[in-house]
Amino acid sequence: MNEIMISTVLYNILIGCFCVVVLSWAVVAIQTVINDFRREKREEKKSAQDDEYHQERMKALK
């Protein structure tokens, strides 16, 4: 009876660790997607600013 109880506890610990690993992996994946989206927005904004600056410089040269 004692062996069954110990193995049940070990299985529960194993399943708990697995759940923690899967949940942490999911959180990291969500954070990565959010950061990629924000980075794309920043790059688009910077590109638009660079284009505008370039156009203004070309007008100033003429």
Image (spheres, grey):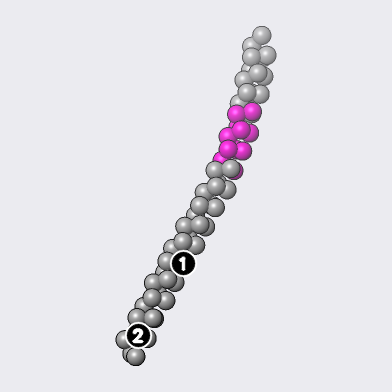
Front residue of 17/7: it is 7
Cα distance, mark 2 to mark 1?
22 Å
Q: What SS does tag 2 mark?
A: helix
Question: Which amino acid does the dot numbered 1 rest on?
Answer: Cys
- Quadrant of the rendering where the N terminus is positioned: bottom left
Write the start and end of the magenta stretch as one range: 38-48
Taking the image as shown, residue 18 lies to the left or right of residue 31, namely: left
Counting from the top left corner in percent of width and height, residue 39 is at 56, 40
Q: Residue 13: percent from the left, percent from the top?
A: 40, 75
17 vs 42: above or below: below
Q: Please state the horizontal and vertical placement of residue 53, each as a whole percent of the image.
A: 64, 23
Q: Earlier in the sequence, mark 2 or mark 1?
A: 2
> What residue does disc 2 label?
4
Question: Does residue 44 show up magenta in the picture?
Answer: yes
What residue would you read off at disc 1? 19
Q: Position of residue 43 (x, y in %)?
A: 58, 34
